[in-house]
Structure formats: C-alpha cells, structure tokens
C-alpha cells in the first residue's frame, strides 16, 4: 500500500427501501400540450428524495430495462460522497466513486469505495491517493504493455487539479494504492480542469475532456486554454486536440463498436461563479471516429430537458445513458428519448454492474436491479458477458 494513502473513515448507513417496480408509460401526445403533465406522477415533497420512478417515453424502454426491473435508494447522506467516476476493480470487487467538491481546499475530493460483495450490503469506505488533488471522472485503464485479454489492472482519473497541482490524468492501482500522474499539460500549456476520460479499446489511446469547473468552483486559476477534447497516447506521449467549439466539454463515451464518440456540453451549468443559464448548451453531440484517431461530422445527438447531461455511458445495444437534472435519461442510437430513471435530483454519473445500475446523485446513492441492459464496459471490467 502506498504509504501516502490516507484512509479517511468507514461508515455503514441503514438502507432506505423505496421500491418502485412498475414502469410508467408517458403519453407524449398529452405532454405535448400540457407542460405540467408529468407532475401527476411525482411526489409532492422531494426535499428529502427517497422515491425513484421508471418513466417510459417510448415502448422500447421496457425492453431496455427489462420487465422485472426495480429501483430503490441505498443511501441519503448529509455529505456528497457519490458524484463521478464509478470504476470497478475485479481483484478487490469494489467500485470507486469520486465525491463532490466540498468548497474547502483543506478537505479535498475523496474516493468513495463501495464494497460489492453481497454480504457487505453496499457498505463503503473513503480514501485519498497521493497523486490525486481533486479527481472527477474516471475509467478503467490498461497501461502500456499490459494485456487487454484480462480485466483492466488500473484506474485512470481525470484530476481537475488545484492552485498548486496541475490538472492531470492520474493512474491508480486500487489494490496497492500506488498512484502516478501520466499527463500534466498540453505541450507546456496547462489544462483548465480535466473532467472525464475514456480509453479506446483498440489503440489504448486516452480520450478526455477539459472544462472550467475547477475555476468556477474556486479551486483552480483562471483558464488559459480553450475548452477542448484531446487524444493522448500513453506509450509515446503524443497528444492531439480532436474537437473544440464547446462552452464546457464534459462527459465522453464511445459507442460499443467505437465508431461514434459522444461528448456532452454542459455550458448551461456555470457553477457558483456564473450560475445556471438555460440558454446555454445542455447537449450531447455525436462524432464519427475516423481511423480510431480523428473526429468528423459533429451533430446534435440529444438535448436534456432537465439539468445537464453529465456522465455518459452506452450499453451493448448502442443506447446512450446520461446523468441529468432529475435522474438518468436514456436515448436509442438515433437520439430518440426512450425513458428516464427519475429520482428528482441532480444526477452526475452512474455505473453499470452485471444486472444492475448504481446511480450517483451526490448525497444519494440509488440502485436499479433486475436490469436487462448490459453496459458497454461490463464484459471488460467484470469478466461477465
């Protein structure tokens, strides 16, 4: 274990059970002329959210979730431990989630470690890794020279940095606790605050987004580089800009065949610095991936009607899932909204497990069980296909 890794605390909170097994069909014709249509299905008091609903905006949503899908809340805390990332490690059988920024430089972002052993009942610990300053998104990671035939041995975090540490890509061994920075700059220029990251299965290249949220939340200096998307080759150090033109580039995800890249622009979310401006983007864009290296044919894929599409994942059928302002929104590969896993609160990210989905809403952790959909990375990460 890395001697610089600090175990912060261990806590188990009683599970709050709020099962909602039925999938509710939404009448889009009625919704088209009644903006308040959805309120008939919503709880009257959402100040302490414990309710989760499954809303079908399209008949296909039942086939995606599965007819026996149920959903419930696991935790509702007074601290925001469940924010981003959500990376599995097979050797430890645990899921690693970044906490939310607590507006305190003396209290950096933690890693929340959720135990997936059935006997543990989703209990968790929290820790920090020495090379991480303020981590946000993340993904499982095959370092150069490792074999892609087994499950990924390491994690890769998008570290937003702080006033001392640059924003960076940080590799972590969750078994030993060893952590190291693998990228800290773009050819000598600082990133603003790297937000989310994915590894290309075929090339091993790292694709990641850069946004201004560290600056907006007062723990990073003023930006000096545009909001761009990058491709980095860890084996050679080569780095390229692959996309620009964003207000705030945020979530990033490949289609299951790696021929399409989805990137969200959450420019409507300005944080405490600028506040919310709903005339700015809350949009997912799709790009064609050319020769596994370049992007072309940018087009609008989807626009979130509530909040901002933050963390993005795809399933093996090509459906696109995103954490938004009221839960998880699910679109098919054509951009048709299939449905929502509605919890009524800002939901930043989530993680597919075999037959399950863990949903991160900062202070709340939710689970969908009996899930038919299979996340794109479940086979690789869990070794269960």
Image (cartoon, rainbow, N blue to C red):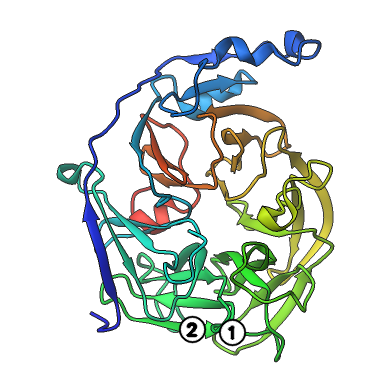
Q: CA distance from mark 1 to mark 2?
A: 7 Å
Q: Which mark is residue 176?
A: none
The answer to whether marks 1 and 2 mark residues whose Cβ atoms lie closer than 8 Å is: yes
Q: Horizontal and vertical percent for residue 186?
A: 69, 84
Q: Horizontal and vertical percent for residue 359?
A: 45, 41
Q: Horizontal and vertical percent for residue 50?
A: 40, 27
Secondary structure state at the residue bearing disc 1: loop
Question: In the figure, 92 relative to 156: above or below?
Answer: above
Outermost residue, left side: 119
Residue 259 in view here: no
Question: In the figure, 350 relative to 381: above or below?
Answer: above
* Quadrant showing the N terminus: bottom left
Q: How many marks?
A: 2
- Quarter of the image for residue 331 reads top right
Seen at 24% across and 41% down, the residue is: 13
Q: Which residue is mark 1?
A: 184
Seen at 59% across and 74% down, the residue is: 205
Secondary structure state at the residue bearing disc 2: strand
Seen at 50% across and 29% down, the residue is: 343
Seen at 44% across and 73% down, the residue is: 142
Nearest the camera: 4 or 271? 271
Q: Horizontal and vertical percent for residue 336?
A: 71, 31
Nearest the camera: 340 or 287? 340
Question: In the figure, 236 relative to 150: above or below?
Answer: below
Residue 315 in view here: yes
Q: Which residue is mark 2?
A: 181
């Amino acid at each position: 274990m890395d001697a610089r890794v600090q175990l912060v605390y261990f806590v188990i909170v009683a599970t709050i059970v709020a099962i909602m097994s039925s999938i509710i069909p939404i009448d889009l014709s009625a919704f088209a002329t009644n903006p308040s249509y959805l309120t008939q299905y919503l709880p009257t008091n959402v100040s302490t959210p414990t309710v989760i609903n499954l809303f079908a905006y399209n008949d296909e949503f039942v086939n995606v979730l599965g007819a026996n899908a149920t959903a419930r809340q696991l935790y509702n805390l007074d601290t925001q431990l469940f924010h981003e990332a959500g990376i599995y490690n097979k050797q430890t059988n645990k899921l690693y989630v970044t906490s939310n920024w607590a507006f305190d430089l003396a209290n950096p972002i933690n890693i929340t470690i959720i135990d997936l052993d059935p006997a543990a009942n989703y209990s968790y610990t929290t820790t920090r890794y020495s090379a991480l300053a303020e981590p946000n998104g993340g993904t499982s990671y095959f370092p150069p020279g490792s074999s892609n035939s087994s499950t990924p041995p390491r994690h890769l975090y998008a570290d937003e940095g702080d006033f001392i540490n640059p924003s960076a890509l940080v590799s972590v061994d969750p078994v030993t606790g060893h952590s190291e920075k693998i990228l800290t700059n773009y050819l000598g220029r600082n990133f603003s605050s790297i937000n989310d990251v994915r590894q290309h299965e075929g090339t091993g290249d790292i694709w990641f987004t850069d946004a201004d949220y560290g600056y907006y939340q007062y723990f990073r200096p003023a930006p000096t580089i545009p909001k761009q998307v990058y491709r980095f080759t860890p084996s050679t150090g080569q780095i390229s800009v692959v996309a620009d033109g964003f207000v705030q580039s945020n979530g990033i995800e490949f289609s299951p065949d790696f021929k399409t890249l989805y990137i969200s622009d959450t420019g409507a979310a300005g944080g405490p610095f600028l506040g919310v401006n709903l005339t700015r983007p809350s949009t997912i864009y799709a790009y064609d991936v050319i020769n596994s290296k370049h992007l072309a044919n940018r087009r609008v894929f989807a626009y979130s009607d509530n909040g901002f599409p933050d963390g993005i994942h795809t399933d093996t059928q090509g459906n696109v899932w995103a954490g938004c302002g009221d839960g998880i929104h699910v679109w098919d590969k054509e951009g048709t909204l299939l449905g929502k896993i509605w919890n009524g609160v800002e939901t930043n990210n989530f993680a597919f497990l075999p037959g399950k989905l863990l949903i991160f809403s900062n202070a709340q952790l939710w689970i969908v069980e009996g899930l038919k959909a299979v996340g794109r990375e479940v086979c690789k990460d869990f070794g269960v296909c």
